[in-house]
Image (spheres, helix red, strand yellow):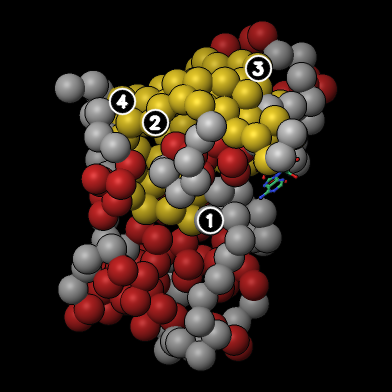
């Protein structure tokens, strides 16, 4: 039994003749907050999707939560995809309960937890608001809560900071820290080093389809020149 929440080796993906991801390895220790950094188009989203078994790799293997296939631990995963989307006619509380139900959570328990999450983040005033009436950032917060309401062991967030104002970015940080304290492992992608520096134990940098760096945030600070750290085009 491995103590890694994600163990991916040699992940490779072609779109036609274009190699979008080229032999990416990733080992995410259980209980850590892990950042996948890289510029737009580097291959982060494609790597995360292969890790989670959403798309099949052309080569490589992904095992989650101590050696399981992604499909066999689906209910223990929380995933915020890069493309956001909620039913616009749903109220925040229903949307969160609905997402929980898709991962096996009882509906009334989902509604109860939705209220608790919203109150904890100071968002109780929008709990009965319809998604279509919300700002994009607020809808993103609702989707984020919906993706973790079933208390998953592994949380994977694709560019969770983008589209959020500074107040919601702070809420997101608080939520990530709280989920780790609960015992979850959190893996998120970003193209902003500062977000990773504030939150992560370890990071990987993916650029032009390959993993170019892996290590602790302190290693990254020591090894990477400033211009690489802030615009990671290695
Ligand atoms: P971004 O933050 O811009 O999404 P990323 O690092 O997540 O960047 P990916 O979305 O994984 O990068 O994309 C990697 C490369 O693969 C990009 O050049 C992208 O255009 C290409 N790509 C991704 N999905 C497809 C697809 N379904 N068909 C063709 N090309 C694709």
- Dot 4 and dot 3 residues touching (CB under 8 Å): no
Give the mark, 1 or 4, whose residue is nearer the N terminus.
4
Query: Label 1: which residue?
Result: 81
Q: In terms of secondary structure, where does tag 2 sit? A: strand
Asked whether residue 203 is in view, the answer is no
| Mark 2 Cα shell of 10 Å, populated few (<14), some (14-19), many (≥20) | many
Residue that appears at 27% across and 79% down = 111
Q: CA distance from mark 2 to mark 3?
A: 19 Å
Q: In terms of secondary structure, where does tag 4 sit? A: strand
User: Is 15 left or right of 78, judged from the image as shown?
Assistant: right
Respond yes or no on whether mark 2 lies under 8 Å from ligand 1.
no
Residue 200: mark in rendering: none
Give the mark, 1 or 3, whose residue is nearer the N terminus.
1
- Dot 1 and dot 4 residues touching (CB under 8 Å): no
| Farthest residue, direction right | 227
Residue that appears at 71% across and 40% down = 16
Q: Nearer the viewer, residue 87 or 59?
A: 59
Residue 4: mark in rendering: 4
Give the mark, 2 or 1, whose residue is nearer the N terminus.
2
| Mark 1 Cα shell of 10 Å, populated few (<14), some (14-19), many (≥20) | some
Q: CA distance from mark 4 to mark 3?
A: 21 Å
Query: Label 2: which residue?
Result: 62
Query: Label 3: which residue?
Result: 212
Residue 113 screen position, x and y as percent: 26, 70
Asked whether residue 94 is in view, the answer is yes
| Farthest residue, direction front | 16
Give the mark, 2 or 3, whose residue is nearer the N terminus.
2
């Amino acid at each position: 039994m491995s103590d890694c929440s994600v163990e991916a080796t040699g992940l490779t993906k072609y779109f036609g003749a274009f190699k979008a991801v080229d032999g990416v390895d990733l080992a995410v220790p259980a209980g850590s907050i892990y950042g996948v950094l890289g510029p737009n188009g580097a291959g982060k989203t494609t790597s995360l999707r292969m890790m989670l078994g959403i798309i099949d790799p052309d080569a490589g293997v992904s095992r989650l939560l101590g050696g399981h296939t992604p499909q066999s631990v689906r209910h223990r995963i929380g995933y915020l995809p890069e493309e956001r989307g909620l039913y616009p006619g749903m109220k925040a509380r229903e949307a969160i309960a609905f997402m929980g139900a898709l991962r096996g959570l009882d509906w009334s328990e989902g509604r109860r937890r939705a209220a608790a999450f919203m109150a904890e983040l100071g968002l109780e005033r929008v709990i009965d608001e319809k998604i279509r009436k919300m700002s994009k950032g607020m809808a993103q917060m609702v989707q984020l809560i919906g993706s973790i309401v079933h208390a998953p062991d592994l949380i994977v967030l694709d560019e969770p900071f983008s589209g959020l104002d500074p107040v919601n970015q702070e809420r997101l940080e608080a939520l990530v820290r709280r989920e780790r304290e609960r015992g979850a492992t959190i893996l998120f992608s970003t193209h902003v080093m500062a977000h990773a520096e504030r939150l992560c134990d370890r990071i990987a940098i993916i650029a032009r389809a390959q993993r170019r760096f892996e290590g602790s945030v302190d290693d990254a600070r020591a090894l990477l020149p400033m211009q690489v750290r802030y615009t990671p085009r290695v």
